[in-house]
Image: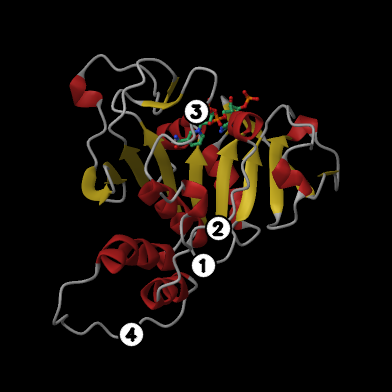
């Protein structure tokens, strides 16, 4: 039986053509397709096109049927299927930067690199407003991708580094670092296509601020009954105040990924 860690790397010619599209290679004129678009093109083609059009921020979370992304103590490996894991690596490869919150780095010690498919590693961005990280985590020690640590402006000094990471002060907003300010700071560094990969608090803050173009929620047929929540937004009392974005659905092995489009 193949385990997740032994899963083969995806390097199909079709995937490489999508990588070229994401990198801004000249798109071929659209001819009427004689055959239906392939599953890869259908899923990633619109994302590549949107990314070429301007700043583009995608949130992604894998959750249980009851809306949890990890157990109470923070175990999330592996909640979703190998297909969703490959999808996450593809999304990294198509993004210029991947953004995570400090709790994910503390609990998972993730690498945030592209390993399940071919493609460039995104710049790794950690949101750690109060400098809870000590630099011992893997992404500060390995040099597989540039790494930025964004913190409150009061917690960083000029030119500071944490391991191999550059420490970037960000002016604090009313509740933490404003997602729009984060996007602006990253855009100044040429990073305008972002994958906000978790956890729930981080993705929720981007969503609450209206800073996501897309939200991808992969739902695994698993019930945890307790654990860390996926999306949490300010309380509403009337269903008319809920978000009802246009969605598309894609099967990811036994999981279903629902992508919300906030641009329409
Ligand atoms: N299933 C999945 O898809 C998935 C993906 C990633 C992670 N995870 C799991 O999720 C868990 C962690 O998620 P989580 O929701 O508890 O935490 P998280 O989102 O990883 O980190 C939240 C923390 O990051 C900082 N932060 C994030 N956005 C900020 C902003 N806009 N401004 C200021 N600070 C900001 C805050 O730090 P301070 O508290 O210092 O203010 C906040 O408390 C882990 O167990 C991990 O395994 C699951």
In the image, the residue with mark 2 has its CB under 8 Å from the nearest atom of ligand 1? no
Q: Extreme front residue here?
A: 1
Q: Which mark is residue 118?
A: 1
Mark positioned earlier in the residue sequence (3 or 2): 2
Q: Could you tell me residue 134's position as x and y percent?
A: 79, 32
Q: Quadrant of ligand 1?
A: top right
Between discs 4 and 2, the one toward the N terminus: 4
Q: CA distance from mark 3 to mark 2?
A: 23 Å
- Choose mark 4 or mark 1, whichever is in front: 1
Give yes or no for contact between labels 1 and 2 (Cβ–Cβ under 8 Å). Answer: yes
Q: Which mark is residue 114?
A: 2
Residue labelled with disc 3: 201
- In which image quadrant can residue 173 be found? top right
Q: Is mark 4 within 8 Å of ligand 1?
A: no
Residue at the spot 20% in from the left edge and 85% down from the top edge: 31
What residue lies at 43% left-to-right and 44% top-to-bottom?
Answer: 59
Q: Pick whichever of labels 3 and 4 is earlier in the sequence.
A: 4
- Residue under the image location 31 percent in, 35 percent down: 220
Q: CA distance from mark 3 to mark 1?
A: 29 Å
> Which structural element holds mark 1?
loop
List the residue tagged with mark 4: 28
**139 relative to 101, above or below:** below
Secondary structure beneath label 2: loop
Which residue is drawn at the image coordinates 50% and 72% (left, top)? 23
Q: What whole-number distance in Å separates the C-alpha atoms at marks 3 and 4?
A: 40 Å
Count neighbours of disc 4 (C-alpha within 10 A) and say few if under 14, some if 14 to 19, many if 20 or more. Answer: few
**Image location of residue 127, percent across then percent down:** 63, 37
Residue 73: percent from left, percent from top: 54, 19
From this view, report whether residue 52 is shown above or below residue 84.
below
Callout 3: SS: helix
Contact (Cβ within 8 Å) of mark 4 with mark 1? no
Whether disc 3's CB lies below 8 Å from ligand 1 is answered yes
């Amino acid at each position: 039986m193949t385990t997740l860690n032994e899963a083969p790397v995806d390097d199909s010619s079709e995937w490489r053509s999508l990588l070229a599209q994401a990198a801004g290679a000249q798109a071929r004129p659209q001819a009427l397709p004689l055959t239906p678009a392939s599953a890869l093109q259908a899923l990633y083609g619109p994302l590549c096109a949107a990314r070429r059009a301007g700043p583009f921020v995608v949130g992604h979370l894998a959750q249980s049927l009851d809306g949890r992304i990890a157990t109470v103590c923070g175990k999330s490996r592996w909640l979703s299927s190998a297909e969703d894991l490959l999808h996450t690596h593809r999304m990294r490869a198509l993004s210029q930067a991947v953004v995570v919150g400090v709790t994910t780095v503390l609990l998972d010690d993730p690498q945030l690199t592209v390993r399940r498919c071919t493609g460039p590693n995104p710049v790794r961005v950690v949101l750690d407003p109060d400098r809870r990280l000590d630099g011992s985590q893997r992404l500060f020690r390995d040099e597989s991708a540039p790494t930025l640590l964004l913190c409150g402006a009061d917690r960083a000094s000029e030119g500071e580094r944490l391991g191999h990471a550059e420490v970037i002060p960000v002016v604090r907003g009313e509740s933490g670092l404003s997602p729009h300010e984060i996007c602006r700071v990253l855009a100044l560094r040429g990073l305008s296509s972002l994958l906000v990969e978790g956890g729930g608090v981080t993705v929720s803050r981007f969503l609450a601020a209206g800073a996501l173009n897309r939200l991808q929620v992969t739902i695994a047929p698993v019930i945890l009954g307790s654990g860390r929540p996926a999306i949490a937004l300010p309380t509403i009392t009337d269903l008319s105040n809920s978000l009802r974005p246009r969605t598309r659905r894609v099967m990811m092995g036994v999981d279903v990924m629902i992508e919300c489009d906030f641009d329409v």
